[in-house]
Amino acid sequence: MEYDREITILLADDHKILRHGLKQAIDNEEDMQVIAEARDGRTALKLTLEKNPDVIIMDVSMPDLNGMEASRQILAEHPDVKIIALSMHSERHYIMGMLKAGVSGYILKTNAFDELAAAVRSVTTGKAYLSREITGLVIESAVKVNSGTPVTDSEKLSSREIEVLQLIAEGKTTAYMADHLNISRKTVETHRQNLKKKLNLKSIAELTKFAIKEGITSL
């Protein structure tokens, strides 16, 4: 897809200083404009609906709703939006989690100011973009998937279960989760028990440790 206008961009990152720096860098490009900013995935969902950006720069680790789950939900509703993952993490489960969510690119924060403009132009023309440091890891992971690698524990969870798991790990109460997710307290408790059963974990501490390990929470 070729653009005959400015490429509109939504920045989603929980670090205000980084957002400010990236906004300045993007706005210096003649063919790009930042039209909205979000500090968490849930706000990114809302702003995508309101602003309809061409590209979303999505931090992987954010409070309330992480970048993986936010990307999955956004692309389910807005498949034409291009998402570029932005992360300090180069570990396999972060990268593959975002790619499985459907993002078009993945760049490391250490390279953000050098690579972001090129990444935006690449994804808007239908091409993928990966920071060079992670290309080999992605190829290696793709080979493993094609050879029949077993499904990971986190991939067994539904989108709602992942949302609940993140909020549990972040110390939110049952009442908060029920109100925030617009479900009953009984449903929250059902999700809590299902998480323990599916993951074979017995306590909130174990659930929290799992969520951190899998990159589901930014704690």
Image (tube, rainbow, N blue to C red):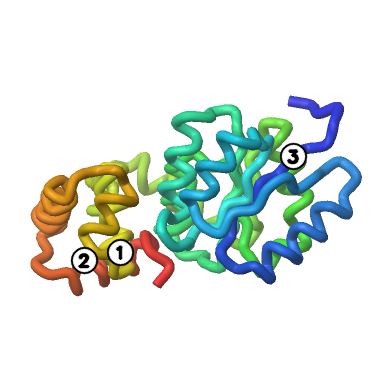
Determine crowd level at label 1: few under 14, some 14-19, many 20+ residues with C-alpha closer than 10 A. Answer: many
Q: Position of residue 201 (x, y in %)?
A: 12, 64
Q: Residue at x 49, y 34 (%)?
A: 75
> In the figure, 205 relative to 41: above or below?
below
The first of marks 2 and 3 along the sequence is 3
Residue 127 sits in quarter = top right
Say which amino acid is labelled 2: Leu
Label 2 sits on residue:
207
Q: Secondary structure at mark 2?
A: helix
Q: Residue at x 31, y 60 (%)?
A: 167
Label 1 sits on residue:
211
Q: Position of residue 88 (x, y in %)?
A: 56, 68
Q: Position of residue 81 (x, y in %)?
A: 60, 33
CA distance for labels 2 and 1: 6 Å
Query: Do we see residue 184 in this rendering?
Result: yes
Q: Which callout, 1 or 3, points to the residue nearer the camera?
A: 3
CA distance for labels 1 and 3: 33 Å
Q: Residue at x 65, y 53 (%)?
A: 37
Image side of residue 12 versus residue 209, left or right: right
